[in-house]
Amino acid sequence: MNRQIIFHGNSFLDYYKTLDNKVKEKIKYVFELIKQIERVPIKFLAPMTGYDGLFEIKVEFESNIYRIFCCFDKGHVVVLLNAFQKKTQKTPKNEIEKAMKLKEEYFKLKK
């Protein structure tokens, strides 16, 4: 399996730049898994129920949980949208809405 990871806009990168180097290393590790493994365990990549085509990449480091929203293009391109640190059980609605808006924008610009 050889997936490609790309970014749409600056939302993910702006957030990524604020993170500690150890967290960045863990994120890079999870990205490598996604690029290389055909069936990525749900622990690392899962569809967002009820949000058409939206997925979340899950990264845990120490006691912190990070989420990166993404979508797929042509099945093998992973488009990173936005990211945040998850502090509660529920995923913040504003982050999901932001991801859906970025996803729509990505596919509109692609046409």
Image (tube, rainbow, N blue to C red):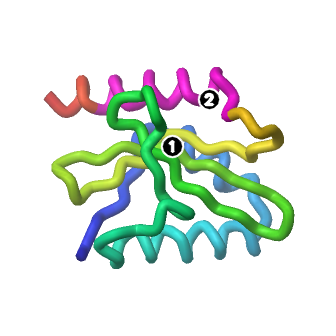
| Rendered image quadrant of residue 63 | bottom right
Question: Which stretch appears magenta?
Answer: 91-106
Identify whether 73 is placed above or below 36.
above
- Label 1, secondary structure: give it: strand
Between 106 and 66, the one nearer to me in the picture: 66
**Which percent across, then down, holds residue 17?**
68, 55
Q: Residue 69: which disc?
A: 1
Between 78 and 51, the one nearer to me in the picture: 51
| Residue 102 covered by magenta stretch | yes
Relative horizontal placement of residue 11, taking residue 107 as reference (left or right): right
**Which percent across, then down, holds residue 33?**
44, 75
Query: Going from the N terminus, do you reach mark 1 or mark 2 first?
Result: 1
Dot 2 corresponds to which residue?
95
| Rendered image quadrant of residue 40 | bottom left
Between the residue at mark 1 and the residue at mark 2, the CA separation in whole angstroms equals 9 Å
**Which percent across, then down, holds residue 70?**
43, 45
| Residue 2 covered by magenta stretch | no
Three-letter code, disc 2: Glu
Identify whether 17 is placed above or below 26.
above
Q: Residue 12: which disc?
A: none
- Residue situated furthest right in the rendering: 63
Identify whether 44 is placed above or below 100.
below
Q: Residue at x 33, y 24 (%)?
A: 104
Q: Which secondary structure dominates the residues rendered in magenta?
A: helix
Q: Are marks 1 and 2 in contact (CB under 8 Å)?
A: yes
Which quadrant is home to the C terminus? top left
Relative horizontal placement of residue 78, taking residue 11 as reference (left or right): left
